[in-house]
Image (cartoon, grey):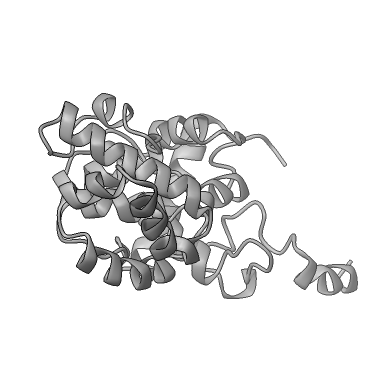
């Protein structure tokens, strides 16, 4: 296959996201929150965990810990930390997540007057916050778009669609930002996430049901379709 020029890749990218917008008109944030701090907590908990499970956990968590100070207090004693760990246990990696959340609560109170910062640079000073988390918080809490949040779905689809050959989230983000106009950066994350959950799954993608099958370089290149490929050759 002839290698794409950058202009051709941009045209294909436009077609990809045009089709995704038609397929997933309601794509967006699933995590439930009522303020920027709760959003940050939910996003940290969502690492290696489904949004559905996070929502189940935060429904009780946010009832018990209603203010930033409640998290700060939980981090001041072993008993408080253990109780917090118990409440988030089912999200996985609960010790690390508890450590990050409780430490970040203290940082937010001491360094930012109890308010979640509104810049990428400041958010990245918080524990457990990398660019993906910062992008999600900035976009959903403040309507600030500085980049594209790259989670496992976004990374996987970017590679399969050959929008990026990188594996590092920062490099994938840069590649997507070059291909997409800034006005589409925020929504692109949720379009790819929805498609990754419903069709282009990690282990068994359904290329036969995919609206992108005619423009996806990886279409039908998976075990489910091996017999058909061999039969037709």
| 91 with respect to 54 (left or right) | right
Q: Nearer the viewer, residue 143 or 106?
A: 106
Using the image as rendered, state which of residue 96 and residue 31 is in the foreground.
96
Q: Is residue 125 shown to the viewer in this render?
A: yes
Residue at 51 percent across and 39 percent down: it is 9
Identify the residue at image location x=59%, y=63%: 213
Tell whether 49 sits left or right of 26. right
Name above or below for residue 126 compared with residue 96.
above
Q: Is residue 121 left or right of residue 86?
A: left
Between residue 153 and residue 126, name the one nearer to us: 126
The reply to whether residue 36 is in sight is: no
**Looking at the figure, which quarter contains the N terminus?**
top right
Total numbered circles: 0
Left/right of residue 9 with respect to residue 160 in the rendered view: left
Residue 112 vertical position relative to residue 202 in the rendered view, above or below: above
Quarter of image, res 232 = bottom right
């Amino acid at each position: 296959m002839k290698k794409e020029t950058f202009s051709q890749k941009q045209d294909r990218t436009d077609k990809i996201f045009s089709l995704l917008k038609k397929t997933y008109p309601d794509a967006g944030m699933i995590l439930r929150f009522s303020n920027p701090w709760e959003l940050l907590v939910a996003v940290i908990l969502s690492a290696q965990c489904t949004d559905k499970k996070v929502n189940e956990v935060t429904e009780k968590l946010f009832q018990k810990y209603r203010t930033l100070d409640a998290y700060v207090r939980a981090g001041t004693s072993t008993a408080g930390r253990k109780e917090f760990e118990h409440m988030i246990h089912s999200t996985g990696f609960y010790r690390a997540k508890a450590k990050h959340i409780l430490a970040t609560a203290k940082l937010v109170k001491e360094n930012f007057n109890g308010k979640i910062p509104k810049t990428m640079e400041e958010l990245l000073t918080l524990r457990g916050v990398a660019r993906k988390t910062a992008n999600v918080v900035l976009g959903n809490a403040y309507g600030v778009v500085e980049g594209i949040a790259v989670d496992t779905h976004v990374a996987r689809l970017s590679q399969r669609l050959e929008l990026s050959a990188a594996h590092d989230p920062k490099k994938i983000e840069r590649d997507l930002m070059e291909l997409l106009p800034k006005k589409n950066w925020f929504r692109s994350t949720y379009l790819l996430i929805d498609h990754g959950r419903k069709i282009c799954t990690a282990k068994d993608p359904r290329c036969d049901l995919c609206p992108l099958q005619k423009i996806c370089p990886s279409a039908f290149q998976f075990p489910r379709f091996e017999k058909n490929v061999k039969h037709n050759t």
